[in-house]
Amino acid sequence: MSDFKLCENGHYFPQGLKECPYCPKGSNQQSSLGKTIIGSSFGNDDDDEDDFGFGNKPSQFGGGNNLNRTQIFGGGGGGNQDFDFGGFGGSNFPAQFQPIQQSTGRKLVGWLVSFTIDANGIDFKLYEGRNLLGSDPGCDIPIPNDAAVSGRHLTILHRMGHFKFKDEFSTNGTFINDVFMEEGTLKDGDMIRMGDTVFKFRSIA
């Protein structure tokens, strides 16, 4: 071994070389235990921000103050948390976990039920006062997928215990129990047809 010398990290290399060719260079660092730590694009700075803005870095990415804690990264929730529900966080919970939204403050007085919009059935609430139906997304009950429904097609008005309806000069008209009608009174169980969309009207007695 006289033709070799030993570097401070325990590598034997030829006497003719000034530096050990086996020691890590550049971004590689030497740990206190003599083991090579491979540098990476995450950096090895001591602050709490990683190169991707996640905040405190998990220990496997070379730093941060999160010791032995599971890190979960997700698409929402704002930042890196010890337990983030897969990234939903805060206001980004799935719809089934959102708080139940209250109505506009008007009393619920009836429903419209349709099996043409959804084969399994779908219902829409009717409230005291005016309820506007049409293809316009601003309507109280929007019907966007029926080309025969006008933007503002039909108004159902509940006043003093009675339901009145009025066609809003729609292109294709409104049919109550298959009879073309422009205005009148609704009774529980009436069928309302607008274009190809059919509703069954149900009132709260």
Image (cartoon, grey):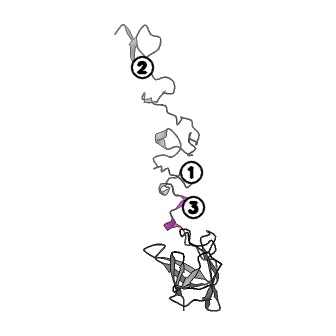
Relative side of 156 to 118, left or right: right
Between 97 and 23, the one nearer to me in the picture: 97
Residue under numbered circle 2: 22
Q: Residues within 10 Å of mark 2 (few under 14, many from 20)?
A: few
Q: Could you say which disc has been placed on residue 32 in the image?
A: none
Q: Residue 88: x percent and y percent?
A: 51, 57
| Helix, strand or loop status at disc 1 | loop
Q: Residue 24: x percent and y percent?
A: 46, 23
Residue 90 among those drawn in magenta: yes
Residue 156 falls in image quadrant: bottom right
Residue 134 among those drawn in magenta: no
Q: Which residues are magenta?
A: 89-104
Q: Could you say which disc has been placed on residue 91 in the image?
A: 3
Task: Say which residue appears at 48% left-offset and 46% top-offset.
Answer: 67
Quarter the C terminus occupies: bottom right
Q: Give the CA distance from mark 1 to mark 2.
A: 40 Å
Q: Main secondary structure of the magenta part?
A: loop
Work out whether mark 2 precedes mark 3 in sequence or the reverse, and give the earlier one: 2
Residue under numbered circle 1: 79
Residue type, numbered disc 2: Tyr
The answer to the question of whether label 1 and label 2 lie on touching residues, with beta carbons closer than 8 A, is: no
Work out whether mark 1 precedes mark 2 in sequence or the reverse, and give the earlier one: 2
Q: Residue 66: x percent and y percent?
A: 51, 46
| Residue 111 vertical placement versus 16 (above, below) | below
Residue type, numbered disc 1: Gly
| Helix, strand or loop status at disc 3 | helix
